[in-house]
Image: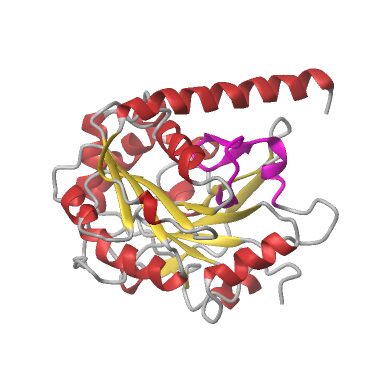
């Protein structure tokens, strides 16, 4: 990489960090318990809106995994989300009614909080419908993974987003508060993914799966990106620049070995496609706060009324992380 590109990327990183610090002014603290964060704690960061029904299982899942403290930005919820978050003693909560789009789709808010509270901590950044699965997650807590990554001087870990869906109409089975969403959305696409490499940032770009075939079949390269870097040993010099799809400095994106070996990686099991999906898509279309004038949600709206069935005869029912490893969707690399 040439000197000019190195300088350009450095300038871009500083620009994103400056945006983040300025956007912290959007946030109002309603339950700041960050004084309880201890050295070495694993932190989770999340921006959300109107996700009250999902929160009991979300907290239970990540607490069992080993997250020590949760940091949330609530973007103007009106369904009781904020009140629920405030009652959680291991959570710090900020609220804002500022534009999600103008905050770079929430990235600025989280970059600001990560720079302020995440320095020298392992930080997990996920949405309320994303659930991390990694090698040995059924027997080893998240700290075992982060300790191993740190011992190997690995600063970040990738995870492919794995869209989960039910067999039959998305809205056929009602989701109940506290329920494991994967009791309903049990199925996934074992293949049907397109992979390329971003030459400028060095990250792998993944598209496809059920969203690619069912909602973007006529424009597959417009389908949502499925590559993410959710787990990072944070430093205040770092910044996400496009959701959690890619970061600066550029080296944080080198989460796949180009020389024939494999680095450890996980999956983010995505519980979007349950019966709450239709109302959520309609709300986000009205708000118009998502990327590219909410093009993704416009594609969803066209199919929602038909109550689509994403299941096909090639779909696989989820069993465990070892199944995902056999299919090549996650890797344990050298971690044994």
Image color mode: secondary structure
Work out which residue is located at the far bottom of the displayed protein and give it. 139
Q: Position of residue 22 (x, y in %)?
A: 42, 22
Q: Quadrant of the C terminus?
A: bottom right
- Residue visible at 36% across and 32% down in the picture: 290
Labels in figure, total: 0
* Residue 193, image x, y percentages: 59, 52
**Quarter of the rendering containing residue 6:** top right
Residue 89 x/y as whole percent: 27, 61
Residue 330 visible, this orientation: no
Q: Which residues are magenta?
A: 228-255
Dividing the picture into quarters, in which one does residue 204 lie? Answer: top right
In the image as oriented, which residue stretches furthest toward the front? Answer: 35
Q: Is residue 229 magenta?
A: yes
Whether residue 247 is visible: yes
Taking depth in this image into account, of 23 and 157 the one nearest to the observer is: 23
Q: x, y (%) of residue 205? A: 62, 43
- Position of 52 with respect to 233 (left or right) is left
Which residue is located at x 30 percent, y 26 percent? 99
Q: Residue at x 56, y 21 (%)?
A: 15
Q: Residue furthest left?
A: 79
The residue drawn where x is 37% and y is 23% is: 102
Image quarter of the N terminus? top right
Reply above or below: 219 against 310.
Answer: above
Does residue 204 belong to the magenta stretch? no
């Amino acid at each position: 990489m040439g000197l000019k590109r190195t300088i350009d990327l450095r300038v871009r990183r500083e620009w994103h960090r400056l945006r983040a610090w300025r956007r912290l002014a959007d946030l109002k603290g309603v339950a700041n318990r960050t004084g309880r964060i201890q050295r070495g704690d694993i932190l989770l960061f999340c921006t959300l809106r109107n996700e009250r029904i999902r929160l009991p299982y979300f907290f239970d899942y990540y607490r069992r995994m080993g997250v020590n403290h949760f940091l949330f930005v609530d973007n103007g919820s009106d369904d009781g989300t904020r009140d629920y978050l405030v009652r959680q003693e291991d959570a710090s909560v900020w609220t804002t009614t500022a534009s999600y789009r103008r905050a770079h789709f929430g990235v600025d808010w989280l970059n600001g909080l990560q720079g302020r509270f995440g320095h020298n901590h392992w930080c997990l950044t996920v949405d309320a419908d994303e659930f991390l699965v990694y090698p040995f997650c059924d027997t080893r807590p998240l700290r075992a993974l982060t300790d191993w990554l740190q011992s190997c001087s690995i600063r970040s870990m990738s995870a492919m987003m794995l869209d989960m869906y039910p067999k039959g109409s998305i809205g056929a089975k009602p989701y109940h508060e506290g329920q494991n969403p994967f009791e309903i959305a049990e199925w996934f696409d074992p293949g049907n993914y397109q992979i390329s490499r971003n030459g400028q940032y060095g990250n792998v770009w993944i598209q496809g799966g059920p969203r690619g075939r069912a909602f973007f079949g006529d424009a597959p390269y417009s389908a949502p990106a499925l590559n993410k870097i959710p787990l990072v040993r944070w430093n205040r010099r770092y910044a996400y620049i496009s959701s959690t799809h890619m970061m600066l400095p550029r080296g944080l994106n080198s989460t796949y070995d180009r020389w024939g070996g494999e680095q450890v990686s996980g999956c983010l099991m995505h519980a979007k496609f349950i019966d709450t999906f239709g109302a959520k898509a309609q709300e986000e279309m009205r708000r118009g706060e998502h990327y590219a004038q909410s093009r993704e949600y416009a594609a969803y709206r066209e199919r929602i009324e038909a109550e689509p069935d994403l299941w096909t005869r090639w779909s696989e029912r989820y069993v465990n992380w070892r199944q995902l490893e056999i299919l090549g969707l996650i890797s344990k690399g050298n971690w044994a």
